[in-house]
Amino acid sequence: MPKGKHLRLKDKVVIVTGSGAGIGKSIAEVFAAEGAKIVAGSRREINGQPVVEGIIDAGGEAVFVKCDVSEEAGVKKLIETAVSTYGGIDVLVNNAGVNFVKPFEKVEPADWDRVINTDLRGTYLCSWYSVPHMLKRGGGSIINITSVHTLACLPGAAPYDAAKWGIIGLTKSMAVEFASRKIRVNALSPGLIDTQIWDDIQAASPDIDECLSYWWSNIPAGRVGTPKEIAHTALFLAGDESRYTTGANIVVDGGMTSQLISQEPYQSKSLEGKTRE
Ligand SMILES: NC(=O)c1ccc[n+]([C@@H]2O[C@H](COP(=O)([O-])OP(=O)(O)OC[C@H]3O[C@@H](n4cnc5c(N)ncnc54)[C@H](O)[C@@H]3O)[C@@H](O)[C@H]2O)c1
């Protein structure tokens, strides 16, 4: 840990789900560098354990818990490990999530259950088990990683859209219910971020130049975001600087959802706003 630096999460106990890769990994690393004690929950030990080892090697504190957030027993173990190892819970980052794209008619009940159980039920379960411990500490911060899908939807993403919109409802309901007891609950909605999904999009594209030009015309910033850019917004939501922020859905998307339609491949002349006679 950097000596003499003001650490924004010094000694805060933070649970991060889905911390074995992508955004969750970055959140765990950035928070640990700010002095947090990380309880890293992930389904797969093979990628979850090295993240924890990396944090410890860098002088931080972290423990790995193998857990599937859709299963109550795993979530219980995650919460119990946080309490038995570090004495309580201050921050919960509900990050674990899965998605796929397929036509609605092909979405079988098992597909629906997989997404809803991980993204929505997992967020509920981790929150439900964490709340009593946060209340014992006099408050806490819950950060739900949602998506730009909470502002607009895509064809072929019905279970994901339903799950992420559901998380917004849960976020706002819990924010209202717990505001007086000092647990803040916020959603953080990323646009397209440079993780496995971006690799998959590019690999599935028949023409990479067309793929890039399509995406850049849909993202005003002209690039995908980095996991660290999401982690830094999460850091604001975790710490005291956001103490008056609750029930919010903070969008970090390079302008993607502020743009009405994708940019034209040609330049239009400027419009003068004439009135019809
Ligand atoms: N990457 C993007 O462009 C993007 C955009 C918007 C929202 N998001 C959201 O951000 C979150 C993280 O996405 P990412 O791109 O970093 O994903 P990722 O696939 O790179 O990493 C997800 C991690 O979660 C773990 N995980 C998956 N299901 C789990 C479960 N049931 N229990 C515990 N762990 C589980 C995986 O093993 C993996 O380590 C997700 O909620 C996703 O919906 C991502």
Image (spheres, rainbow, N blue to C red):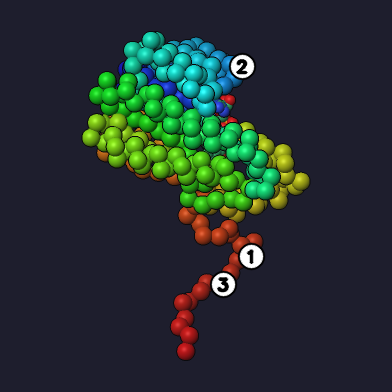
Find disc 2 in the rendering and name its residue.
46
Task: Residue at 75% x, 47% y: name it.
Answer: 207
In three-dimensional space, the C-alpha distance between marks 2 and 1, rounded to whole angstroms, equals 48 Å
Q: Residue at x 44, y 18 (%)?
A: 76
Q: Residues within 10 Å of mark 1 (few under 14, many from 20)?
A: few
| Mark 1, residue position | 266
Residue at which label 3 appears: 269
Q: Position of residue 12 (x, y in %)?
A: 34, 20
Say if residue 1 shows up in the picture.
no
Q: In x, y percent, where is residue 116?
A: 54, 36
- Marks 2, 3: nearer the viewer: 2
- Which residue is pictured at 45% across the width and 39% down the height? 167
Label whose residue precedes the other's in the sequence (2 or 3)? 2
Between the C-alphas of marks 3 and 1, the distance is: 10 Å
Would residue 149 be seen by someone viewing this image from the given angle? yes
Which mark's residue is nearer the viewer, 2 or 1? Answer: 2
Marks 2,1: beta carbons within 8 A:
no
Position in image of residue 91 (x %, y %): 37, 25
Q: Which amino acid type is shown beneath numbered disc 2?
A: Ile
Residue shown at the point (66%, 51%) measured from the top left? 213
Q: Nearer the viewer, residue 247 or 8?
A: 247
Q: With respect to residue 272, does 100 lie above or below?
A: above
Question: Mark 2 or 1 closer to N-term?
Answer: 2
Q: Quadrant of ligand 1?
A: top right
Q: CA distance from mark 2 to mark 3?
A: 55 Å
**Element on which disc 1 rests:** loop
**Mark 3 crowd level (few <14, some 14–19, many ≥20, 10 Å Cα):** few
